[in-house]
């Protein structure tokens, strides 16, 4: 059984950047992100909206531990590869605090993380397996599922970021960066792509936006400015909405 699961997890290399699987993944994700909150607002009562939010939160959260369980069964779990020391993974684990507890600080942090890091991940996914492989669904649930949850929180639960939320999220990002550096040094790992640009499990280079930001370590500094720019960009719709209300 262990060998069969290992071969399943690592035997598929059919995914191609901007191939059919990639483009369909983006299209279906966008449809979910738009349609699910719209249906919830238009057709569901408060209680049903709450339960649907809980389901979204739990599905996204469980995405990461299910993967870890499979890696453990396959005997391929590696502390230098599979810990929740990437933004998408820690966001998966924290999203129930937003969808179930309505914890505002968590929302502030994840809103900007999700609409920058997860969005960039959807454009240049670091996966090797195509549809209908587990890794294919794991990636889309883990990245665009976060975006769906955050859009749902904004549209259905009426949670709104503030200008101060930008700085809270940016500070949290840099705290996470420092923790990732420490973990990388201890484990000889490359979490958060601090020690090198993204690669597949087989070591192949994965095209990403980091390729346009210069060599290591300068792309880390470039990514800081880009992240802040994305955070401001993500807040702009709320700025104009607030301005129109006044």
Image (cartoon, rainbow, N blue to C red):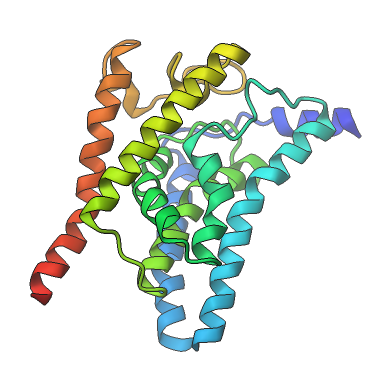
Tell me the quarter of the image containing the N terminus: top right
From the viewer's perspective, is residue 33 above or below residue 230?
A: below
The front one of 133 and 103 is: 103
Horizontal side, residue 166 vs residue 14: left or right:
left
Q: Residue at x 43, y 67 (%)?
A: 152
Instruction: Return the x and y of residue 243 as percentages of the image width and height.
Output: 9, 68
On the rendered image, what quadrant is the C terminus found in? bottom left
Residue 148 horizontal side relative to residue 56, left or right: left
The image quarter containing residue 208 is top left
Please provide percent x and percent y for residue 38.
Answer: 39, 76
Q: Is residue 245 above or below residue 78?
A: below
39 or 149: nearer the eye? 149
Residue at image coords 47%, 17% = 205
Residue 131 visible? The answer is: no
Q: Horizontally, is 84 left or right of 197 in the view?
A: right
Looking at the image, is 98 positioned above or below residue 131?
below
């Amino acid at each position: 059984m262990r060998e069969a699961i290992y071969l399943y997890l690592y035997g598929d290399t059919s995914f191609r950047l901007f191939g059919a699987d990639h483009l369909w993944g983006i299209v279906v994700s966008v449809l979910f992100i738009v349609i699910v909150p719209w249906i919830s607002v238009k057709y569901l009562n408060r209680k049903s909206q709450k339960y649907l939010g809980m389901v979204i939160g739990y599905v996204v959260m469980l995405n990461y531990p299910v993967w870890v369980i499979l890696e453990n069964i396959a005997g391929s779990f590696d502390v230098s590869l599979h810990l929740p020391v990437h933004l998408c993974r820690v966001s998966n684990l924290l999203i129930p605090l937003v969808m179930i507890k309505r914890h505002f600080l968590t929302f502030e942090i994840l809103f900007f993380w999700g609409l920058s890091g997860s969005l960039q991940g959807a454009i240049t996914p670091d996966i090797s397996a195509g549809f209908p492989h587990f890794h294919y669904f794991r990636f889309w649930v883990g990245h665009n599922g976060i975006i769906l949850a955050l859009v749902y929180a904004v549209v259905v639960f009426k949670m709104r970021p503030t200008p101060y939320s930008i700085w809270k999220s940016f500070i949290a990002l840099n705290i996470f960066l420092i923790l990732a550096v420490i973990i990388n040094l201890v484990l000889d790992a490359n979490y958060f792509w601090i020690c090198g640009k993204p690669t597949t499990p087989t070591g192949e280079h994965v095209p990403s936006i980091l390729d346009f930001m210069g060599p290591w370590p300068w792309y880390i500094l470039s990514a800081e400015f880009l992240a802040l720019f994305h955070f401001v960009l993500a807040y702009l719709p709320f700025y104009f909405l607030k301005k129109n209300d006044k």
